[in-house]
Amino acid sequence: MSSLFFWSAWSRIYRSTYLVSLFFVAVSVILFIIAWAQGLGNVVHWNVLSELNELPVTFQTFSDGLLDYAVNSKAYAVSEQFVASPMQIRPGVATAFLIGISIAFIVLISAVTRFDRVRYLVSMAALILGLAFFRWEMLEIPGLGGNYLFLILTFVFGSVSYYFHAFRADYPITVRLAVFTLLTIVVAALLGALSPVAFPAMIVVSYGMPVLLVFSIGFIFFIAAEIIAGLVWITSAGKPEGSSPQVSQRRTLGFNNFLIVSFLYLINLALIWLKNTRSIDWDILAISPFVLYLTSVMLGIWGFRRLIQQQDAVSFRDSGAYLYAGLALLTTLTMAYAFATANDPLVELFEDVIVYTHLAMGLCFVAYVVINFLPIYQQNLPVYRILYKPKRLELSLFRIVGVVGVVVLLASGGLITFRQGVAGYYNGLGDYYRVSNEPTSANAFYNLALEQEFQNHKSNYSLASLALSQNNQTAAAFYFQQALLKQPNPQDYVGLSQTYLQTDLFFEAVKTLQRGLRAFPGSGELQNNLGYLYTRTSVADSAYYYLKAATGNVSRDEVPESNLLAFYARNPSVLAADSTLAKNTAKSTYESYQANALVLRMVAQSQLARPDTTQPEKPAWLTESIANQGLSVGRFASLYNYALTNQRSDTSLTATIQRLSTDPVNQDFTDDLLLARAVAEYNRKNHVDAFGLMNQLAESDQQNGAAYRSIAGIWFLEQGLYRRAAETFAYNSDTTSIYYRAVALTKANDLAIAQSFWETASRNDPAVAALKQVLYTERKPETDLEKAFYATYRLDDLNRGAYWETIKDPSLKTVSGVALVNNYLDDLQWRNAQLILSGLPDSDQITPVAVSMRTIAALRLSAFRRSVGSAETMANKPILPHYQAERTYWLGQTYDRTRQFAKAQQSYQKAIQLAPLNPQIVSAAAQLKRQQKQSREAYDFVVKALPYNEDNAELLKTYINLSLDLSLRDYAENGLEKLQVATTPADYQAFLTTYQEKLASIENSRQKFLQ
């Protein structure tokens, strides 16, 4: 163990500093392995490109018991594809690399100061020569152009180094390391402060790369024999057999095993060499050259110590150990940087150098062992102890032969390795000028790299990235194709496919992705993108297959999973085949997935026998601070779709939408956000703002104005504002709007005006034509629906009850019966109303709408009869949300008529919150407020409802009286003019008399006050 942990015998100073240097080497190895494992992922990342797809949906429905009403709009599905990012250039990596190189330089220069004179001068000459080729003048230090900066650095470091070597050789390693570290920090700080260039570390590294390559290649050659040396140790070291102390009785693996294992190792290297030079095209499983390098570096820690000790050239503790650590650190970091920047020519250079040096030096070292130590091997002696003390030929001779062998191997490849080094150098310079925003220079250097190696991936992909930044799709496609020649990656196929899509070459894009999948059958990104393209065609089965296959093959499974939901939503036939698809959605925080789950829910509602009435889950991001930021496509779609599907009152939702819609960064989504806000305000029962927003949208967007007016018209129908609904639909010319206009006028009991619209709407719709014929007595009602429709809306036919009695459908009988009940109550015939109400079917036989309507009718009858107990009993029965305002209103009427004004006011207040524009509710509540001398508050909610009910005589009368109470005579006069149009002459004259009496009373009071 003492030889394994040899540093344990050193003094604490040397042991600590050496372990620190080994720590840096270990860190560099870890960084190298990470960069190696990530490969192209170090600089090219998968981004997600989201696309909005409009889908027609019904986001709200209601029924009046006879007819169903659907609020239609568009929802957004999000389709996503993976796109390869442009090649990223991170100057921070170059800065970290330069720091590591500086550490290696500190260790190296500290080590060489303890060499003897000749070795010191040679080593310092190599270091100074290396400094000379770093092109320091590119830092553009003011006043230090040309070689002045190099000369200053040479003088500073050279003089300090010589001082330690010649005058203070007794200083321990800690002093030397500390001085050179401080000196390096000062120099780096000064250069960084004085240099005007944008990225000084990167320019130093880029222009100094040839020096780093030379030092790295030299170190790789130096350790190339370490694996063979390790085999010598394995095959010659052993244990004594039994208790015999004689060395000749040692049990070792022996010389034959050494030759066999060495032969297998060299065969592996030879096969790699033949494959790299295209001499063979075998699919062989060979050990990676980089694994051989890491193994050599590790074995070299002990092997180099053995070499130093056996040759007794320098002190291993004082200098040799640090020399090896510095070179190992420099070489490993250089290789890691090549991988981190995806500079594949440099990666291939190192791969070739490792193979060539290990093959050539491996052969030479085997010959060296055979020539010098065969007799000793045959005696089972520990050859490793004298491995570097040859009996016949010196190791240096074999190293010279190894150099010749490496040159021969390089020449056999046509010096491609050298050209790869030059290409890698130009790639580094291209990266620097690209990150410095000098695309012309960057383009020139990348093209110089292509001249050396036209198939190198780094240059082609970088040039494709530059072309894309300039929107030159043709050039980008060319370079992506070039990148596929030698080292194809899924990112290249995706990039090429995107260029085809941008130039409307759809089928070429599909073929490219298909080629990519043949080369990379497990690439989920390619599968997702191909599925995405197939969703744009009629080949639905292929789209489903590839999207499903992509799930589990990508790092972001949520992308293909989200695309599957969008695929289902865009293909209702798939949902028809399996309705569970809409329900089997996972809980996800991914915005696009949430958006597609919501749109799938809306699309599926029309196909479900029982629509899903559960409330959707609120997107998680809306509750976070990120909701204050700009909207991505996924976030916008999830917000918009959630606003359409959510039926609950949500104050925070409307506040969020309002804030986002006024943010300039979201201007592309402004109209859609206004619609979403209008829906949210409507669900909050803030109908004034909801209708105001819809009117704003209809006026500002001529293209979609009809759709916005249709939504507002349906809402007006739901709120019972029939004439306002008819006015809104009058702006539209489509058949559906004409139909709804006819319905609205019919509900407003204006059959004469509605007739022409029924005629137009029924031309191509037999169902509508049947209703029109029955309504205008062109034929007698036959079906239950026709009978119920006639009994409900032909108020002028006193015998319509005869048709009602023949209705068999319990729900239709209930709905039309409730209409008769209301007519009788309007005429104060409560006994007839009670008689019909008692004859309605049982609750378990009818729909929830019919149950709710019957409950309201019973509650109204209780209010008419002033039966508080009956009214309270009916008010506690289950009822649909749409009828809650009426329930609360009629309960308030009961309290009002029994002079329980506090309870009445409380009920009216709840009713107004639910239906703030209902003229009946607003009038009753305002009149009670007026009786209690709260005219200002009553006036406020009457003013809100009046613009939507200017045809309602009762509300106009209330408004006029309140205006007089508040001394707003001009407003009262204006209201009087509107009342004259809205009511009958007799009613107007009766009110006018009362109005004039009150006006005279006010005038008399004023005159008395003035006296």
Image (cartoon, grey):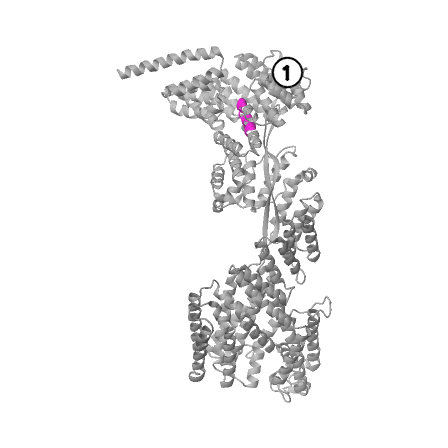
* Quarter occupied by the C terminus: top left
The residue most toward the left is 1011
Q: State whether the magenta stretch is mostly helix, strand or loop.
A: helix
The image shows residue 289 at horizontal and vertical percentages of 64, 70
Determine whether 536 is above or below 84 in the image. above
Whether the magenta-drawn stretch holds residue 719 is answered as yes
The image shows residue 414 at horizontal and vertical percentages of 67, 72
Q: Are there few (<14), some (14-19), or many (20+) residues within 10 Å of tag 1?
A: some
Closer to the camera, 54 or 817? 54
The residue most toward the bottom is 392
Report whether 1007 appears left or right of 651.
left
* Quarter occupied by the N terminus: bottom right
Residue type, label 1: Tyr
* Residue displayed at 66% across by 18% down: 773
Helix, strand or loop for disc 1: loop
Q: Which residues are magenta?
A: 712-724
Report whether 64 appears left or right of 411.
left
Residue 998, image quadrant: top left
The image shows residue 418 at horizontal and vertical percentages of 62, 72
Whether the magenta-drawn stretch holds residue 214 is answered as no
* Residue displayed at 67% across by 20% down: 770
Determine whether 927 is above or below 343 in the image. above
Residue 382 is at least partly visible in this image: no
Residue 580, image quadrant: top right
The image shows residue 167 at horizontal and vertical percentages of 42, 84
Check disc 1 and report the residue beneath it: 776
Q: How many marks?
A: 1
Residue 1003, image quadrant: top left
Report whether 1010 appears left or right of 93.
left
